[in-house]
Image (spheres, coloured by chain):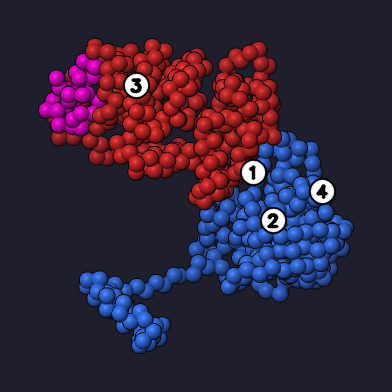
């Protein structure tokens, strides 16, 4: 690689087997790859981007968002898999176009929102969450016309019913104002979580939110949700789960009430990291490794994988100046 | 209880752009929505229907594509939707609009209550609701934030005023205009969309409602828009420099000079000016 100043950076990128999931853990390494994919998500450890030319995608002509409230978590998971086109319990389901987003809010997230809506005026503009709404799935489609998406949504209605839901228990948004309401709902959960943790930190400043960022392959979705539910129930920890279920990428937010909860939560986090790696998943699908998840990265790629990352780091940053401590516990050079 | 809700199509409120040369609203590529205040009107009507029974009819005047917007009102739970659409209605001001709506409502038959949004977000006049009531010869009350009580004969409303609130009782049939504090409008459901799929929006022309050609459209308008422009905002600001005490002193001096503040001895508070 030739820099603008004429300096040559050369080296061989080692081959690496990466999980077949949405992934933001460690460097992206693949044969015949575009170098831009190495730099994106490298957490500032390989260089500093001083200029970027962006190519924009055209804005969709039509955009519809639908929140479906399912009566059970099982029904919600069926819906997610059916929308993704998977075979689900002999369901004769129409094949829908691929949605651009599938998001998930579990019963604890909805309970937290109900509570905040009642007591906190900042959330007074949230639509009513009826008592029988158990788990919410948000779906978004882009298309060329409203008529096209109207048909998609009617077919979705049939699918919701086939999965055990009721098409009456849905919010459909096709205008900017209505979409804004669904966006408000989507963002309200993490906001409520942050507010709650801020309150608890006033009593115990050492606790923080413990938010996971892991993803697994499609076929492991049911198993990973089951794992989270079982472990959380056994631990007695307070939590909410929400996030990008389309990519099997659920954020489990553990809400510690005290230091003992915090300690238990961290133990669970490490346990899940090991289990998810065994399922062929990733310990970080979105937020990256940073400085506090370096042990998870080692868990995922092993000593051999970490050494390959160090090789890459040495090619671009031989003096080890860039973001020391990110990705590698003791710097990238050792 | 038969309720009529007047709705208007407006550009999505946060996306209004003006062509600086012609002074007209750029509508291309801008999403159209139900005037947000009319959404509160429709929601209130649907809640009344749910508790008292009856029918909700939505009515609008506009170009044929407004029928799509009226379909949304059917998806939300309205029972019937009517669009007054005719080239003869074009260019109407609030007076001509109120007349056309009154003629349309006349054709609808009997009603108990008309609910409108307090104003439209594009024109911001707040005139159509009260004008419509006058045309129909029924009592009205504006800026309603709560329906306190309603029965077959009367409606009791709490309304916002410039200085607070007041409670008003009206004989039905009547018209009210509502503000956003009154409720939180629902979102359509897929089952609502499915139901609306089979319902038709009635399209009525000027002749269908027996409108007098002299009272509709540009011809029937008492006002005409000759120019639309974005007002220039002139802001004057002055920075008061110095430490907090000096800034406070300067602020008090200016307020005194403009007669906005008076210092009266012996009534307390005098010390604070020095503190």
Q: To which residue does mark 4 refer?
A: B53
> Of circles 2 and 4, which is in front?
4
Q: Quadrant of residue A157?
A: top right
Residues at circles 1 and 3 in contact by the CB criterion of under 8 Å: no
Range of residues picked out in magenta: A306-334
Mostly what secondary structure, the magenta segment? loop
Which residue is the site of mark 1?
Answer: B187
Marking on residue B41: 2
> Nearer the viewer's eye, disc 3 or disc 2?
3
User: Which chain did the renderer colour red?
Assistant: A
Front position in the image: B191 or A119: A119
Query: Rounded to the nearest whole Å, what is the CA distance between mark 2 and mark 4?
Result: 17 Å
- Residue on which the image places disc 3: A267
Q: Is residue B46 above or below residue A164?
A: below
Shade representing chain B? blue
* Direction bottom: furthest residue: B265
Q: Secondary structure at mark 3?
A: helix
Left or right of A114? Residue A31 is left
């Amino acid at each position: 690689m030739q820099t603008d100043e004429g300096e040559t950076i050369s080296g061989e990128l080692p081959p690496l087997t990466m999980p077949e999931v949405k992934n933001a853990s460690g460097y992206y390494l693949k044969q015949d790859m575009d170098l831009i994919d190495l730099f994106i998500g490298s957490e500032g450890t390989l260089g500093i981007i001083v200029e970027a030319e962006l190519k924009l995608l055209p804005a969709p002509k039509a955009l519809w968002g639908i929140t479906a409230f399912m009566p059970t978590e099982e029904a919600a998971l069926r819906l997610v898999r059916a929308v993704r086109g998977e075979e689900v319990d002999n369901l004769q389901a129409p094949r829908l176009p691929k949605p651009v987003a599938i998001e998930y809010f579990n019963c604890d997230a909805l309970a937290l929102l109900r509570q905040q809506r009642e007591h906190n005026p900042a959330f007074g503009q949230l639509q009513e969450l009826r008592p029988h709404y158990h788990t919410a799935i948000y779906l978004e489609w882009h298309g060329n016309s409203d008529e096209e998406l109207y048909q998609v949504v009617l077919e979705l209605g049939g699918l919701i019913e086939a999965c055990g839901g009721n098409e009456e228990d849905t919010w459909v948004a096709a205008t900017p104002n209505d979409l804004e309401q669904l966006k408000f709902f989507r963002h309200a959960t993490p906001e409520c979580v942050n507010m709650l943790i801020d309150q608890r930190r006033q009593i115990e400043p050492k606790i923080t939110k413990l938010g996971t960022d892991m993803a697994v392959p499609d076929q492991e979705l049911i198993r990973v949700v089951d794992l989270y539910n079982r472990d959380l129930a056994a631990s007695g920890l307070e939590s909410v789960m929400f996030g990008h279920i389309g990519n099997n990428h659920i954020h489990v937010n553990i809400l510690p009430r005290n230091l003992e909860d915090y300690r238990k939560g961290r133990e669970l986090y490490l346990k899940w990291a090991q289990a998810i790696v065994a399922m062929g998943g990733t310990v970080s699908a979105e937020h990256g490794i940073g400085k506090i998840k370096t042990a998870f990265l080692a868990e995922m790629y092993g000593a051999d994988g970490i050494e390959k990352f160090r090789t890459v780091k040495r090619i671009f940053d031989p003096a080890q100046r860039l973001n020391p401590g990110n990705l590698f516990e003791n710097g990238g050079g050792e | 209880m038969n309720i009529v809700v007047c709705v208007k199509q407006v550009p999505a409120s946060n996306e209004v752009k003006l062509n600086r040369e012609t002074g007209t609203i750029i509508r291309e590529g801008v999403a159209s929505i139900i005037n947000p205040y009319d959404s509160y009107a429709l929601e209130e009507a649907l809640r009344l229907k749910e508790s008292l029974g009856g029918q909700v009819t939505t009515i609008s005047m506009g170009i044929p594509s407004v029928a799509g917007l009226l379909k949304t009102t059917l998806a939300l739970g309205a029972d019937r939707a009517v669009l007054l659409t005719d080239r003869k209605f074009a260019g109407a001001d609030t007076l001509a609009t109120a007349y056309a709506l009154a003629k349309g409502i006349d054709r609808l038959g009997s009603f108990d209550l008309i609910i409108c949004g307090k104003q439209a977000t594009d024109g911001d006049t707040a005139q159509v609701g009260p004008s419509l009531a006058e045309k129909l010869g029924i009592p009205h009350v504006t800026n309603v934030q709560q329906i306190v009580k309603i029965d077959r004969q009367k409606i009791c409303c709490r309304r916002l005023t410039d200085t607070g609130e007041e409670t008003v009782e009206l004989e039905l049939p009547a018209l009210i205009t509502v503000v956003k504090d009154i409720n939180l409008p629902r979102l359509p459901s897929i089952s609502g969309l499915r139901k609306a799929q089979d319902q038709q929006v009635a399209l009525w022309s000027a002749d269908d409602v027996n409108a007098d050609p002299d009272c509709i459209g540009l011809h029937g308008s008492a006002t005409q828009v000759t120019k639309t422009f974005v007002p220039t905002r002139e802001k004057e600001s002055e920075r008061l420099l110095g430490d907090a005490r000096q800034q406070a002193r300067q602020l008090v001096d200016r307020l005194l000079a403009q007669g906005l503040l008076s210092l009266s001895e012996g009534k307390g508070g005098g010390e604070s000016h020095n503190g």
